[in-house]
């Protein structure tokens, strides 16, 4: 009987010790999920690829999302503008609570200071990349539904 009890406790301990790792792996998968990728061709040599990534969605009340725009001119990457938004929601309404941005430029291009804004359930931002007399303004918008879905 003593051997059976010890064997059971050993198996149970191993099972319990591995549970947090399994749950953590599952949560990390849910916390970073690309929701949408779209490419816009402006017809003037510029293309912008916009990737929407759901960073974290708390089933109770908050969601965090990022949108990244990669700007290319004649196929060369010139800049990357990322908008980060945090939203609260309750099933009947939603509100943007925080917005921030990151910007990088490449291939000798520069950028102006990004502008960000909160309005109701929307977080938006824009940034202009330029080199000489050539420029392109990239605008991003995130909207949160009352259920916490981001578009």
Image (spheres, grey):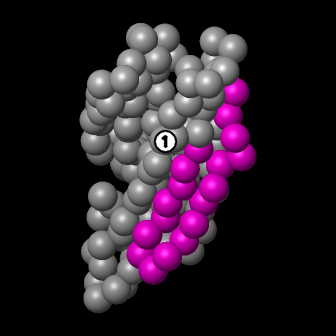
Taking depth in this image into account, of 85 and 29 the one nearest to the observer is 85
Residue 109 as seen in the image, left or right of residue 81: right
Q: Decide if residue 96 is in sight here.
A: yes
Q: In this view, does 145 lie above or below 114?
A: below
Residue that protrudes farthest toward the front in the picture: 133
Circle 1 Cα neighbour tier, 10 Å, few/some/many (<14 / 14–19 / ≥20): some
In magenta segment, residue 125 = yes
Residue 100 in the image, given as x and y percentages of width and height: 63, 56
In magenta segment, residue 79 = no
What residue is drawn where x is 66% and y is 21%? Answer: 132
What residue is drawn where x is 60% and y is 59%? Answer: 116
If the image is split into quadrants, where does the C terminus sit?
bottom left
Q: In this view, does 52 lie above or below 69?
A: below
Magenta highlight range: 110-127
Secondary structure that dominates the magenta span: strand
Residue 148 in the image, given as x and y percentages of width and height: 34, 70
Taking depth in this image into account, of 138 and 61 the one nearest to the observer is 138
Residue 79 as seen in the image, left or right of residue 121: right
Residue 39 in the image, given as x and y percentages of width and height: 29, 31
What residue is drawn where x is 30% and y is 25%? Answer: 43
Where disc 1 sits, the SS reads: strand
Residue that numbered label 1 is attached to:
138
Taking depth in this image into account, of 92 and 22 the one nearest to the observer is 92
What residue is drawn where x is 67% and y is 34%? Answer: 111
């Amino acid at each position: 009987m003593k051997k059976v009890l010890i064997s059971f406790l050993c198996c149970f301990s191993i099972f319990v010790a591995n549970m947090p790792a399994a749950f953590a792996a599952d949560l990390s998968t849910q916390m970073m999920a690309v929701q949408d990728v779209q490419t816009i061709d402006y017809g003037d040599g510029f293309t912008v690829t916009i990737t929407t990534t759901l960073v974290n969605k708390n089933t109770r009340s908050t969601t965090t999302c990022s949108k990244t725009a990669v700007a290319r001119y004649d196929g060369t990457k010139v800049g990357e503008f990322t908008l980060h938004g945090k939203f609260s929601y309750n099933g009947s309404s939603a509100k943007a609570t925080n917005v921030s941005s990151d910007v990088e430029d490449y291939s000798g291009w520069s950028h102006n200071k990004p502008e960000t804004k909160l309005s109701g359930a929307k977080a938006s931002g824009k940034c202009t990349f330029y080199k000489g007399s050539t420029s392109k303004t990239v605008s991003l918008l995130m909207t949160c539904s009352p259920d916490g879905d981001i578009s």
